Amino acid sequence: MSPTDVLDRIRTHLNEECEIPVERITPAASFRDDLETDSLDLLSLMNELDDLLGGARVSDEELIAIQTVGEAIDLVLRHNQAAAS
């Protein structure tokens, strides 16, 4: 799985669920400031990405710490790598 694959899933979810234009969803975009999402939107996104996590559980602390789309991508890739090991 590549960062682009994860970004595509994030874009699809945020576009469909929050009606955010895909072109606004970049790795540097802040969920709260740039995309105007809230913690429930982020939780919904992580539930959507659950199958990409390889069965790993994301802690509340990790979820709260995510500020940008890029950080969400990194989290998914990190957990996916750990599950593959």
Image (cartoon, helix red, strand yellow):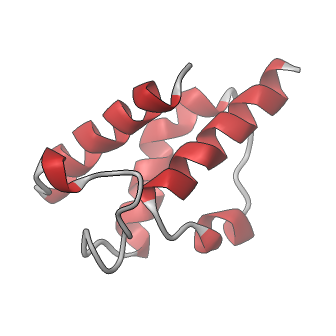
Which residue is at 24% across, 37% downward?
12
Quarter of the image containing the C terminus? top right
Residue 39 falls in image quadrant: bottom left
- Up/down of 31 relative to 55, above or below: below
Nearer to the camera, 46 or 5: 5
- Up/down of 42 relative to 64, above or below: above
Residue 64 falls in image quadrant: bottom right
The percent coordinates of residue 58 (x first, y second) are 70, 52
The percent coordinates of residue 61 (x first, y second) are 72, 71
The percent coordinates of residue 76 (x first, y second) are 61, 40
Which residue is at 50% across, 70% downward?
67
Nearer to the camera, 80 or 34: 34
Nearer to the camera, 73 or 44: 73
The percent coordinates of residue 65 (x first, y second) are 63, 72
Which residue is at 35% across, 42% downward?
10
Q: Residue furthest bottom?
A: 33
Q: Residue furthest right?
A: 85
